[in-house]
Amino acid sequence: MKEYRFRLILILSAIALSLYLLYPTYVDHQNQMMINKILVQKEKEFKLQNPQISANTLDDKLKAVEDSIKNSDPSFNKMKLKSIKLGLDLQGGMRVVLEVNTGKLLEKLAKNPDDVFKKVMKSSEKQAALSEESVVNIVAKNFAARGIRLSRYFGNIRQSDNEIISDLKKDADDAITRAMEIIRNRVDQYGVSEPSIQRQGNSRIIVELPGVAREEEAKQLLQGTALLEFKLVKDPQLTISVMKKIDDVLAGTYASDTSKADSSSKSINKVANQNKVAASDTNKKMTPEEFASKHPFFSIAMIDPKGSTADAYVKADDRAKLQLMLNRPDVQSVIPDNMQFVFSAKPIANQNGQPIYMLYCVEKNALLTGGVITNAVATISPETSAPIVDMEMNSDGAADWARITGANIGKRIAIILDGVVYSAPVVQNKIAGGRSQISGSGNLEEAQLLAIVLKAGALPAPVDIIEERTVGPSLGQDSINSGFTSTLIGFLVVSLFMIVYYQRAGLVAAVSLVFTILFIFGILAGFNATLTLPGIAGIILTIGMAVDANVLIYERIREEMATGKTLKASVDSGFSKAYSAIIDSNITTFITGIILYQFGTGPVQGFALTLMIGIGASLFSALVISRLVISYMVAKGIKFSIG
Amino acid sequence: MRIFEDIHIDWLGKRKIFYAISLSLFLIGWINVFVRGLHFGIDFKGGTEIVLQFDKPVNVSYIRQYIDNIGLGFVELKTFGGETGVLVRTESQYIPKNIFPKVVDNISAEIEKYYPGIPKKISDTTLSSVTYTFANADTTDQIVNRLLAKGYQAGKVSEELTNTQMVVRVGIADWIKENLRTKMPDNQFQIIKEDHVGPKVGNELKTNALIAIAISLIGILIYLAFRFKFIFAVGAVVALFHDVLITIGLYAALYGVIPGLNLEIDLTVVAAFLTLIGYSVADTVIVFDRVRENLKIHKTMPLEELINQSVNRTMSRTILTAGTVLLAIFVLLIFGGEVLRAFSFTLFFGTITGTYSSIFIASALVLEYANRFQKKVNF
């Protein structure tokens, strides 16, 4: 037994690890089933309440229910993050490749565009549609061909064509960064779970939105224009008094509602615990539960009692819940008409590393919109060496800005893009002439982000959809079903064949096949990999290929036995002689797997990944598990047949 | 149970027959490639493809009458999955110039329906969008919302409060959907799949696929040259070319022959080809591995006899390993659903030709080389 101990421990720990890695996927599946059950029931209820309910309203209501269930227990999200993800082709969703329309951007940047300019742009656009070359180069070439200097339309008269070209290229590059930020901001707010926004090459953005059902709306989201606004942050005292009113409204109804809130009390508990400092000024002797039920608003939106502002701190997990609270009609009724609560765009991390959003209270009417901004650049201030953003406005804007800043010295103005706050600087003095300096960014990156946002209002980044793939949820579900049916049938057919052909040795191969499949899924979960339909095909293919190693070994053992060796000697030399063929043949398949992974996109990458993982797992099963079982059987004299 | 046990067949003596078989398969396929052409999916050609799932069963020819006269030129229609699914595909990227005005008229009529007599001006049109300008910002907002609710891709040109411009995007897919929705009001549909690939992207994907195949072949060549003698690597890679070319030929020959089997070359089919390259060499390696081993044992045996013996000895395992893979792929072909059919088909026939070439072609090439140059192959 001793000689097997190490290998046995190795195998058992591999199995235990796989099961451990797969556990979250199992729990997540159970959670999803539970949520779906509730949703089906709720759908019936909603339809009963209002038979004429429109599909969109129903969707919204169900989404709200789903969100509130998911947010009620943080472990739901934790499990989801650790489970095997399904690709867009399996869960449904959209994959969109966007390209920044540099032609449109150049038209916007050009000063006094005339007919000649338009003509050149039109023909350049046609050439660019089929060419790999950058649009800026094509346009520059076309102007050069007509003997027109670029400085006639871009930059200033002293600049050479080459300087202008490099400036324009930088502008085009900026436009992509801007478009990405705008899209990221919107997608975050739209509430798509696990979106992926990546930049590809020079001018492309790949956006993947899993589970998006309303295709038109999502496309609008990606292509629409951005709104930048400057809004006055409300006076802290006024804000706190409104917040207190909201708190009272919520507490009044909330108190009778505690039974329903049971499932969510766990998370409130934690919040309230950490909130003890914030709560201390009002309720020193209260337990966290009491505080949470008496002050449902302040237990989630925490105010720093010593702070000079009324910005509330909201944990990322609580944001959706707070939004639901704020949307309630009874809460809305106590918020004055000209006031509005808005969240910060990005979360900051608190001491425990948890993401925290800020909640600001601003005046509803914008002081100014971003169309007046002509430029914004992030730099390091020469005086304080702190990062700052220089913002320039056109003459219209500058006049308004001087009046606005003059009237609000000492107050704060929030910079809001598409409804979320990026910064809320304090007005130091009246700014005339349209040149402002915004300080207070934590680092240069933050300042650069703010500059991007400020420009987004003035210079939209026009994007075109150049590739789009949408899979409806029903097709996705069909694919999952057919995928798993095929996996099961494939496994049964191959196992049956092995058992018939090799008898007991075949049974050993079939059992190691079970472990191979277990390892594949375990590793997929461990890598947080995405399972796609071709990925499932890869697993089925692996099932067929995994027993190859067993076949090679068994055939070799038979051959050795035919030469008159004992069973034990045949098994030993069978394994060792089959090694080289097994390794060589698997490595070539692995090589193509790597190349597929490099060159493939989305679903195909999923296939390459399962193929590679499958090869690794099947080698382990055949060379370690099968070998151990067979050697053990032979050593113990257990009846072993190889057909 | 045992198959091919203890066989002594002079395979290499019959190699001319196998060359003839391979050559004729190759010719049949490639005559078809040149005459009938290869059919690429929109991944490589660019274009628009939508799959509609109707509420009630539909007939493709019934839908064709509505599609043929909407001015898109040639539109391909196919059943997809069951009898309620229809795949609509066109290679056009944009709505043709001659029907663009019609599309714009439709939008204008839609606006007119809700806001009769409202002053509007078309301020810009591109290949895929039209921009309207209205008198004031409020009506612009309302019209945008109205059209959005109607399923148009309408949007404001800018979010500034003073914005009076509305841009409506019109794509091929929108035009097809709009037409079918209005013409078949009693049988509504859902979009279950929609793909749109621009011409530039299609070209890039094609280049990438070719590069990937080339790198795979080179990678395998290098690995095998490292593990075996260089001539074995060449034999294996030539056999791979043989497999890939014959399978491609088969694609052209069988296109449209088997009903329900949609043999178009798309990204997943290329993935299948790459897998084929990786897997089909595995069988060749099994034979070569044995040749390598025998070369060390029987130092004086003539090469032809030695290879024959190696092929005969490994015959059963070559057939068995390919057999289990074929079993799994066959299951995938039958139960894997519409999306994976062409993929499984490629792997299925590719594995068959791959096994055949491993046994009969790859080793024969090594022998041809040794005979021609009178070289002794050894390790």
Image (tube, helix red, strand yellow):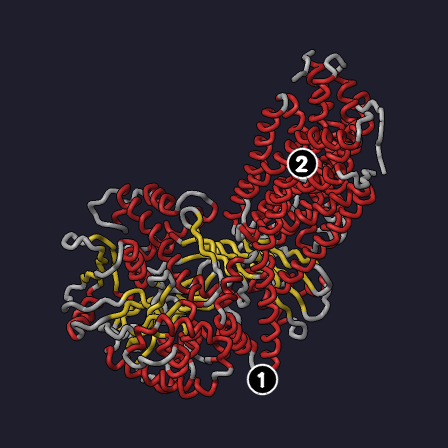
List x then y, in percent, for residue A238.
Answer: 25, 82
From the image, tell me which residue sits under label 1: A52
* Residue B26, image quadrant: top right
Q: What residue type is labelled 1?
A: Gln
Q: Which residue is drawn at 57% across and 56% down?
A: A84
Tell me the number on the disc at residue A598.
none
Quarter of the image with the C terminus of chain A is top right
For the residues labelled 2 and 1, the Cα–Cα distance comes to: 58 Å
List x then y, in percent, for residue A389.
Answer: 23, 58
Q: Is residue B273 left or right of residue A630?
A: left
Query: In the depicted view, which residue is nearer to us: A126 or A41?
Result: A41
Residue A403 in sight in this render:
no
In the image as oriented, which residue stretches furthest toward the front? A2
Q: Which residue is drawn at 30% across and 69% down?
A: A229
List x then y, in percent, for residue B84.
Answer: 70, 65
Q: What residue type is labelled 2?
A: Val
Q: Which residue is drawn at 30% across and 77% down?
A: A280
Q: What secondary structure is found at the residue carrying circle 2?
A: helix
List x then y, in percent, for residue A265.
Answer: 46, 76
Quarter of the image with the N terminus of chain A is top right
Q: On what subunit does the disc labeled 2 rest?
A: B
From the image, tell me which residue sits under label 2: B244
Marks 2 and 1: same chain?
no
Q: On what subunit does the disc labeled 1 rest?
A: A
Q: Which residue is drawn at 58% across and 36% down?
A: A591
